Amino acid sequence: MSIFSIFTLLGGLAFFIYGMNQMSHSLEIIAGEKMESIINKLTSNRFLGLLLGCAITIAIQSSSAVTVMLVGLVNSGLMDLSNTVGIIMGSNIGTTVTAWIMSLIGVSSKNIFVQMLKPESFAPLLAFIGIVLLMLAKLPKRKEIGNAFVGFAVLMFGMMLMSNSVAPLADSPAFAKLLTAFQNPLLGVFTGLVVTAIIQSSAASIGMLQALSMTGGITYGIAIPIIMGQNIGTCATAILSSIGVNRNAKRVAAIHLSFNLIGTTVFMIIYCALHSFLDASFLNLKVAPVEIAVCHSIFNVSTTILLLPFSKMLVRIAEGFIKEDAVLQIAFLDERLFNTPSIAVGKCDTFANEMAESAQSAVHLAIENYFDYEENNGHMVRDLESRIDTYEDRLGTYLIKLSGSKNTQRDKRRIAKMLHSIGDWERISDYARDLTKSALEIKEKKLEISEQAKAELKTLSKAVAEIVSLTAEAFVHSDAELATRVEPLEQVIDLLVTKCRENHIHRLQDGVCTLERGFVLADTLNSYERISGHCSNIAIAVLEEGKEKFGPHGYMQQLKSGNDPVFQKLFQEYQTCYLSDFQEK
């Protein structure tokens, strides 16, 4: 084997890893929305978790990506540690599919249909289809399908390069002598572990083993221990991803490592026992790529069957190995989720929805507390406002970084909706806090508000409470129909505020109201007006999410021109509900 063969081997490995990463990333984007839906349906049922882990890994062709995603979800406080066990086990089974795909490299037959299964037959065709899709397709999802095809073709090309580079080893006495050292199973385990940990891809190390098997020098006795070691080495990615996360997230990597360590230890004991006490002549038989795929599948499925009943024990081992933090850490979104953008967007949705519901609660509490101030309610409003401030700061930063990922068009619109809205929710909570300050001022200064002003404010409060509830529901459910109801109500609230100010001036002139009461009333009206204005902004963001082409300025001009019958109908309904009642008082 010459120096050029080594260069070819390294180049083949590089093509393989690049193709695998390209294909996995594109498949993540294609399956992203479905994957998010699957994760959201996750329950504590370990069998369901097993199926989910297997399905997700097959879909995105990367068990490492699944494990990193789990570390991110647990670190963000969005998934319970015990729910990850089944998914980790399932991902180990799902990753065996890659080995089966790569085993096609060893297919040989004169039958045309069997020949079509050979990578050198169909990989060029997939590459051509992929390039055509990349150049001509207009839809982003079709371009990603093209990327996946090209990535798969590059992966297979790398596999063929590795196979061709090691072909001369078949006649090399030095190589045959080297292989005798691997008859020691512990050395085989160690080699599989180290190689996989270095290249951080069990698929790539399995591919290298399958390429070497085509020299005819790899036996079952050599392959089986290496496969066991590869399963431990693949934990390196999870261990690296757990650096800098909270204790609970570190336990995900600990579960992954303990699962593979226990499985390898048990089966190594069985392997050595069979080798020592029974006739294990089959261990000297040569293996082909397909037999390596079979061994890989049997080991991972058997390990899962063995340890699935002991899922809780694996969690306890991880908890015992990694003790709880002395100080409870605040969980939030983790940047490791950027590897699976659709999952990251879905979790951002969860926090943004919590923001909306918290802002709604703050406004409702402030309104209820306005005329009969209670300190506990005041504290609750301030706590909600402080929490929303934190959400706005951290979620905004996270979304800006996430927007730089390779997102689907739908996810881009979801990110845009959140970026356009979270600042408005934060401002709404600020005005809820201001309402609480006004209520406290009324109580402390013992200000008497006239019955007429009180009646007007109660009508206005009812309208503001409705618009906030309407906006929150439209935002959480991305409901465009509900969002269209916000602007008509906002216009009516503007009229109510104007009427309140006019009536207040009349009361001042008549001596019914004082300037001190007037300052508090002015602050209150300003808060209500601004709250409804921010609700209008959020509603437009919801409408914009539902349409690929939506012009906010054109939409507002159309409404104000009076040419929108739906707006006019809703505007009249809200006028009847609030303004007519307001004027009677």
Image: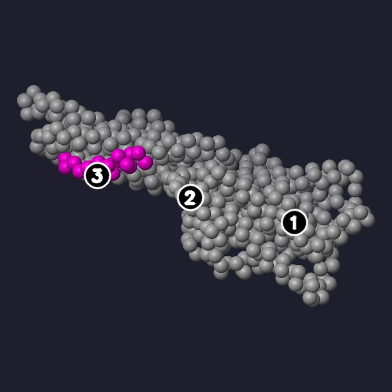
In this picture, is 552 found above or below 466?
above
Query: What residue is at 16 percent from the left and 40 percent from the top?
Result: 371
- For residue 190, the mark is 1
Q: Amino acid at mark 2?
A: Asp
CB of mark 1 within 8 Å of CB of mark 3? Answer: no
- Pair 1/2: label in front: 2
Query: What residue is at 23 percent from the left and 34 percent from the top?
Result: 437
Query: What residue is at 91 percent from the left and 54 percent from the top?
Result: 174
Q: Give the side of residue 221 with respect to residue 175, left or right.
A: left
Query: Residue 276: image x %, image y %?
Result: 79, 72
Question: What is the crowding at mark 2: few (fewer than 14 residues within 10 Å), some, or many (at least 20)?
Answer: few
Q: CA distance from mark 1 to mark 3?
A: 62 Å
Q: Amino acid at mark 3?
A: Asn
Question: What is the crowding at mark 3: few (fewer than 14 residues within 10 Å), some, or many (at least 20)?
Answer: some
Q: Tell which circle, 1 or 3, labels the residue nearer the N-terminal end.
A: 1
Camera-side residue of 45 and 146: 45
Label 2's element?
loop
Tag 2 residue: 325
